[in-house]
């Protein structure tokens, strides 16, 4: 038992839902729950690795396990597992039939790594490209330089969902994806691709029907200080931080 508990820690009920996905592998000196609690604390508070409180395992150990879990796609599997549980609890089919795609440009820190300038948003950094279901629950994430056009990465993002949502039939996008060939998405994935256009007569910010869900997900992520900027040198670690935020958001719905 850890000496101190934090608001970001998993409850017993939440851990029971997660444990089968992370335990049962080779024995470790530190309890797997404590490793995950440390990662959730990091994502929520935005602290540096070296400033993880002493009540958690050493930061080197926590980072080592994060890299192991990333290499084995355990965080990805956990996101899919929790999404199915949350959808079932909400009276929905575990697999969505409709998804929404969008991206968010964020500044990067001094740590380096691939980045570029997004002329539209006037941001030098990276883009978080996400796909969610109609409840706003994460389906997939990919991080890339901000200067790259959304259409360049859409197919690679969609490819990460293949086999994980067997009922998926369609994907909604905004006008930033107008260059994506509809027939290409159909031939590659068998999904309908629809660009939702805003009314040209409307001025300023307008909530677009159905697509507001993914905007709300980005707002949820805004409550995690590790995501206020992209602090990671590697885009793959940036993706893991988004997944950790999604894991905490979904686990909180389970108790």
Image (cartoon, rainbow, N blue to C red):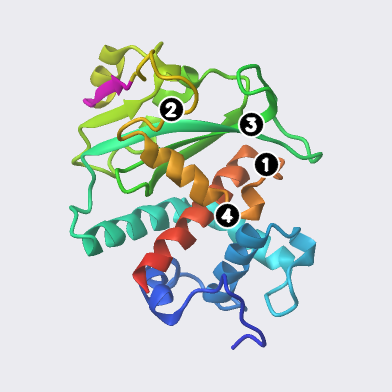
Residue 230: image tag: 1
Residue 186 in picture, x, y percent from top left: 24, 20
Residue 38, quarter of the rendered image:
bottom right
Q: Which residue is mark 2?
A: 156
Stretch in magenta: 190-196
Point out the frontmost of discs 3 and 2. Answer: 3
Q: Earlier in the sequence, mark 4 or mark 3?
A: 3
**Residue wearing tag 3:** 126
Taking the magenta stretch, the answer to whether it contains residue 73 is no
Indicate whether residue 194 is drawn in magenta: yes
Circle 3/circle 1 CB separation < 8 Å:
yes
Disc 2 on helix, strand or loop?
Answer: helix
Callouts 2 and 4 close, C-beta under 8 Å? no
149 to 76, vertically: above or below: above
* Helix, strand or loop for disc 4: loop
Residues under labels 3 and 1: Cα distance? 7 Å
Q: Tag 1 or tag 3, which sits nearer the N-term?
A: 3
Q: Earlier in the sequence, mark 1 or mark 4?
A: 4
Q: Secondary structure at mark 1?
A: loop
Tally the numbered discs.
4
């Amino acid at each position: 038992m850890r000496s101190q508990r934090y608001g970001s820690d998993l409850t017993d009920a939440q851990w029971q839902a997660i444990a089968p996905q992370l335990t049962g592998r080779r024995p470790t000196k530190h309890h797997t729950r404590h490793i995950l609690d440390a990662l959730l604390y990091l994502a929520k508070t935005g602290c540096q690795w070296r400033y993880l409180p002493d009540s958690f395992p050493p930061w080197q150990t926590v980072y080592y396990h994060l890299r192991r879990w990333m290499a084995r796609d355990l965080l990805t599997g956990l996101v899919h597992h929790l999404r199915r549980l949350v959808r079932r609890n909400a009276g929905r089919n575990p697999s969505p039939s409709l998804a929404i795609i969008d991206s968010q440009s964020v500044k990067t820190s001094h740590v380096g790594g691939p980045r570029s300038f997004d002329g539209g948003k006037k941001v030098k950094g990276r883009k978080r490209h996400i796909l969610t279901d109609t409840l706003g629950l994460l389906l997939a994430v990919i991080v890339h330089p901000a200067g790259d056009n959304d259409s360049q990465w859409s197919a690679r993002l969609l490819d990460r969902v293949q086999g994980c949502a067997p009922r998926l039939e369609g994907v909604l996008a905004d006008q930033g994806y107008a260059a994506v060939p509809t027939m290409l998405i159909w031939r590659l994935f068998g999904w309908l691709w629809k660009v939702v256009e805003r009314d040209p007569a409307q001025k300023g910010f307008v909530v677009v029907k159905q697509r507001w869900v993914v905007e709300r997900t980005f707002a949820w992520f805004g409550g995690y200080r590790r995501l206020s900027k992209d602090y990671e040198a590697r885009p793959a670690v940036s993706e893991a931080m988004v997944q950790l935020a999604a894991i905490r958001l979904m686990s909180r719905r389970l108790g």
